[in-house]
Amino acid sequence: MITFVSLISGSSGNATFISDGKTNLLIDCGMSGTKLKEALNSIDVLPENINALLLTHEHIDHTKGAGVISRRYNIPIYATEGTHISMDTGKISEENTRIITEGSAFEIGSIGIMPFAIPHDAKQPVGYTFHVNNEKYSLATDIGKMNTNILDNIIGSKSVLLESNHDVEMLKCGSYPFPLKRRILGELGHLSNEIAAKTALYLVQHGTEHIMLGHLSKENNRPEIAMLETYNLLSNADVNVGSDMTLQVADRYKPTLF
C-alpha cells in the first residue's frame, strides 16, 4: 500500500511523506523537529524510521528542521549541490550529505526517484517524481512558470501534489510591497491558481487520478478559491470531479492524505 501525504503545506512551511511500507521518504522539512514528530505520529510513522530526507531547495519554509532531524535521527539528506551549499541547516555529517543532479534518476530502497529542474529563485531547485510499484507520484511546487520539462516529468503520475500558490488579483491588490509581488508573479516565483488549474486539467487528461493543490499563500489565496478555480476548469472540460478523479487542497498545518 502506498502512502502519499502532505504533512504541512504553505508559504510558512512544507513537508511531504511517501512510503511503500518498506521505504519511508520525507521530502522537505519546513517545520521543527517536534512538529515533525507530531505530524508523523498522527499517521503512525516514527521519525527514526525515515530512510532519507530529500530537499527541493534551500528556502527556510522547506529546510527549517532538516539539520535537526538529520543529526537527531541520523538521516541522510539528498539534495542538489546548489541546495547543499546554500541551505542554512547547521553542520551535516559527510556520511549524511548526498548530492543529486536534476535529470539523473536514483533509488532509495524500493523507491525510484527522478529529480527534475524547476524555475524558482533558489540555487539549484528541483521537483521529484517517485516510482513505486509500477506507479508514479509527483511533487511539483515552487514553480515560477510551468514548462514542458516539468510536464514531461510529471505526466502519467497517479497522484500529484501541485502548487496553487496565489490568486493573481488578490496578490496585485494586497499589502505586499511591489518588489515582492513582482518576484512572486515572475518566472522564478510561484504558480497562480489559474496556471495550476490548467496544469491539473492537462494531467487528468493524461491519466492522473488524484490532484492535491498545495503551497497556498496565506495572504494571497484561500483554499476555497484555489479549489474552485481548478474545479470549474475541470468541470467545464467534462471531467467529473469525485468520480473521474479526486481534487483536494493540502492543509497548511496538519497532514492531508491523498
Image (tube, rainbow, N blue to C red):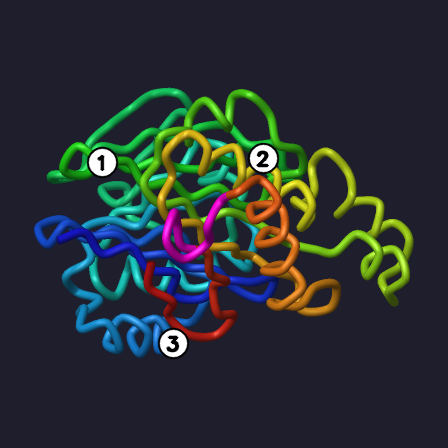
Q: Is residue 65 left or right of residue 130?
A: right
Q: 20 or 14: nearer the eye? A: 20
Amino acid, disc 1? Glu
Asked if residue 233 lies in the magenta stretch, the reply is no
Q: Are the residues at dot 3 and dot 1 in contact (C-beta closer than 8 Å)?
A: no
Q: Is residue 73 left or right of residue 29?
A: left
Foreground mark, 3 or 2?
Answer: 3
What range is drawn magenta here? 239-246
Amino acid, disc 2? Lys
SS class, disc 2: loop
Residue topped by disc 2: 123
Q: Main secondary structure of the magenta part?
A: loop
Foreground mark, 2 or 1?
Answer: 1
Assign the C terminus to one quadrant of the image. bottom left
Residue topped by disc 1: 135
Q: Are the residues at dot 3 and dot 2 in contact (C-beta closer than 8 Å)?
A: no
Per the model, the C-alpha gap separating discs 2 and 1 is: 30 Å
Of callouts 3 and 1, which one flags the residue occurring earlier in the amino acid sequence?
Answer: 3
Residue topped by disc 3: 35
Q: 219 or 57: nearer the eye? A: 219
Compared to residue 46, the image places residue 158 above or below, namely above
Where residue 178 appears, as percent x and y from the top left, is 91, 53
Please name the residue shown 48% across and 60% down the image: 14
Asked if residue 243 lies in the magenta stretch, the reply is yes
Amino acid, disc 3? Lys
Q: Residues within 10 Å of mark 1 (few under 14, many from 20)?
A: few
